[in-house]
Amino acid sequence: MSHLFLRRWAILLFVFLLLLVSFACAFLTGSPAPETPAPETPASETPATEAPSSEELIVEGEVVYGPGSFNFPDTKKGLSDLVSYKASLTLSFDGTRDGKSQKWVKTYVMLNAKEPAAIQLTIEKTGDLTDLNPVFMAEVDGVDYERRGKNASCTANVIELGESLADRQEPASFLNFVIGTEQAGNETVNDVAANHYTFDERAFGQADITKSTGEMWVASDGGYIVKYLLTTNGNADYFGEGIEGTLTVDYELTDVNQSVTTTLPDDCPSGLVNVPMLPDASNILNIPGLMTYDTSTNLTDIAEFYQKQIPDLGWVPKEEPSITETTAMLDFTQGNKTMAIIITTGENGTNVHILLGSSH
């Protein structure tokens, strides 16, 4: 075997182990992997772990992977093609830290639907973690909702491009990819026909670092992970200084292409205002619960415009509108939601304010 071949394998080993060290540290601190940081875990809860240098990881030998022929490098594969699903991930650790017993469990549950587009993620935590506050996150109608802690308030912000909740916190992204798994038959899991595979620490190139046992079921049609189980026993070489024990990963995908419903807490702010504007609208502002804009259209015509348009969107007039020479106020309801349209005249034209609220 040539020295060049060995060096190429050594470089691949360095990259692979560097990812695994980051992944292990993320699990033990209760945080997602580095590319999807979890702000619910304070920095003080995450001990600094220095990655080994390239000189330390270059070895004269070939990395040993699993003996099977099936590889699964992208753990999120196929999810974007599904109409809807429920993804559940439970991470649990049982071991010691600096000689003291440490046990904790974190459970992630994501509901994801395309029509209408909505995503919900809850995180529950128990055990020896500094921050045990539950987390609620959701995306509905272009708005990102978030609550951290039982008594915390629910906040709302417009979703920024490239900051989707699924991109940042998809439970499947926390799973280890595998190389060289072995076929173990075909089964129906969570009402999905799936191919069953088994693997051990070699599937991660960790033959000399940990002892692991794992199973995964991959949908025969669609190629997404339906179920994934992994138990890893390790010491400081894997988990970091002063830590040893057993990490268990339990992931399941259910309700595939079935109805899943996102439910916002009652105190969450209203979403974006989705109503028509006058054709000459300018200086437009649209944030959760509020839309404002300027127009040269006169007050009376604006009031008539909304009296015709809003009921067509499923809103019911709450009472007779109040209209004067300088101000008009229109109120509508839709279930437990309220809408107030306030129109005022000024020196530079007419200003329209549309506010969403709740009757709770």
Image (cartoon, grey):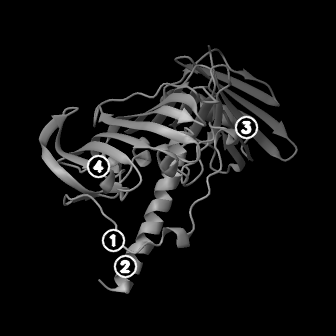
Of residues 337 and 343, the one drawn nearer to the viewer in this rendering: 337
Vertical side of 13 occupied by 189: above or below: above
Q: Are marks 1 and 2 in contact (CB under 8 Å)?
A: yes
Residue 266 falls in which quadrant of the image?
A: top right
Residue shown at the point (54%, 73%) measured from the top left: 55
From the viewer's perspective, is the residue at label 1 or at label 3 nearer? 1
The dot on residue 200 is 4
Q: Amino acid at mark 3?
A: Val
Residue shown at the point (52%, 47%) measured from the top left: 236
Residue 23 lies left or right of residue 251; in this view the side is: right
| Residue 238: % across, % down | 48, 50
Is tag 1's residue or tag 3's residue first in the polypeptide sequence?
1
Is tag 3's residue or tag 4's residue first in the polypeptide sequence?
4
| Residue 243: % across, % down | 54, 41
Q: Residue furthest front?
A: 99
Query: Which quadrant is the N terminus positioned in?
Result: bottom left
